[in-house]
Amino acid sequence: MELLIPLSTGLNTPLIVLIAIVVLVLIFIKMSLVIISQSETKIVERLGKYHATLKPGINIIIPFIDRAKTIISLANGRYVYTNKIDLREQVYDFDKQNVITKDNIQMQINALLYFQIVDPFKSVYEISNLPNAIEKLTQTTLRNIIGELELDQTLTSRDTINNKLRLVLDDATDKWGVKVNRVELQDIMPPASVLQAMEKQMQAERNKRATILTSEGDKAAVILQSEGEKTSVINRAEAAKQKAILAAEGEAQARVRRAEAEAIAIEKVTEAVGKSTNPANYLLAKNYIETLQTIASGPATKTVYLPYEASNLMGSIGGIKDMFKMGD
């Protein structure tokens, strides 16, 4: 016994067609709407010709007629195909490369390049492989710059090399719509033999500077010592001079004081003996007597010589005797 189920496909055909049309419309709308993230863009071609540069947000295109241009980009050190263009500043870390200096020293250098796409149209249509072009341009430019410098200049002029390399790359990549912001040399690695020679040279230079500083110190010490001795001699001479001056001034003042005392004594004697007697004879006789007492008080072995004018002494003594009589 067979069970026959009638097919009623004619009744469901319009519904199926409607569903299909709705699905196609939704797919068409989805393909027409392109959402672009911030700091990104896409280049849209219409029938193979440049049509527009999409801005961040919602953009409308015509499916199957408009399509985003596929480009080559660098992601995690690998070249990848994508239709998005990143407008943020990007960093390329290039592998180490061999360069030769002006004095024929081979070394390895790797660099970091910071750049930014400022014109998406040029970055797509003016160059076929932008990351590879920037890398090769950086390598060749770096070789040329290092080839103009000697080893010592290369090791001590990183800032100069960075600025010169940035200017050359920025000028060369301007036609590609790229702005090179800065370039940094990471490592400069000379051969081991050169490093050993440089270390010996630096050690010799340090020893040379130490010897020079020691000799300069000894020279300065000798100069300071001689200047100290010179100052000491001058000070001693000045002290002796001042001492002599002070002694002479003291002697002069002493003589003045003695003369003043003698004058006062003469005045007193004059007052005592009166005007009739010469006070000078009195003082002279007194000095003779004091001198004879000094001579007589000495050792007995001395020979005493009286002055040639001893009679004057006797006359002075007699005058003193007369003076005392007058006083009586």
Image (cartoon, rainbow, N blue to C red):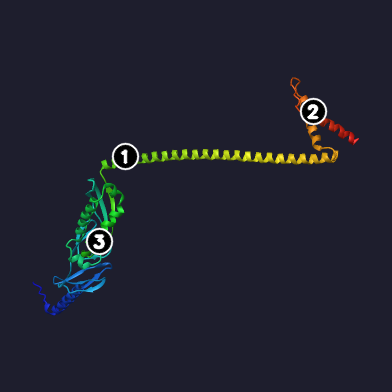
Q: Is 178 in front, or is 207?
A: 207
**Residue farthest left in this picture:** 1
Q: What residue type is disc 1 on?
A: Lys
**Quadrant where the C terminus lies?**
top right
Q: What residue type is disc 3 on?
A: Asp
Could you tell me which residue is drawn at 30 percent across and 42 percent down? 198
Lower sequence index among marks 2 and 3:
3
Q: Which percent across, then down, holds residue 8?
A: 12, 78
Q: Is 254 in front, or is 328?
A: 328
112 horizontally vs 212: left or right: left
- Pointer 1 local density, CA inside 10 Å: few below 14, some 14–19, many at least 20: few
Lower sequence index among marks 2 and 1:
1
Which of the 4 image quadrants contains residue 23?
A: bottom left
Task: Check the image and report above or below for 162 versus 303.
Answer: below
Picture disc at residue 200: 1
Could you tell me which residue is drawn at 74 percent across and 40 percent down? 259
Q: Which residue is mark 2?
A: 311
**Quadrant where the N terminus lies?**
bottom left
Q: Which percent across, then down, holds residue 258?
A: 74, 39
299 horizontally vs 241: left or right: right
Picture disc at residue 170: 3
- Pointer 2 local density, CA inside 10 Å: few below 14, some 14–19, many at least 20: few
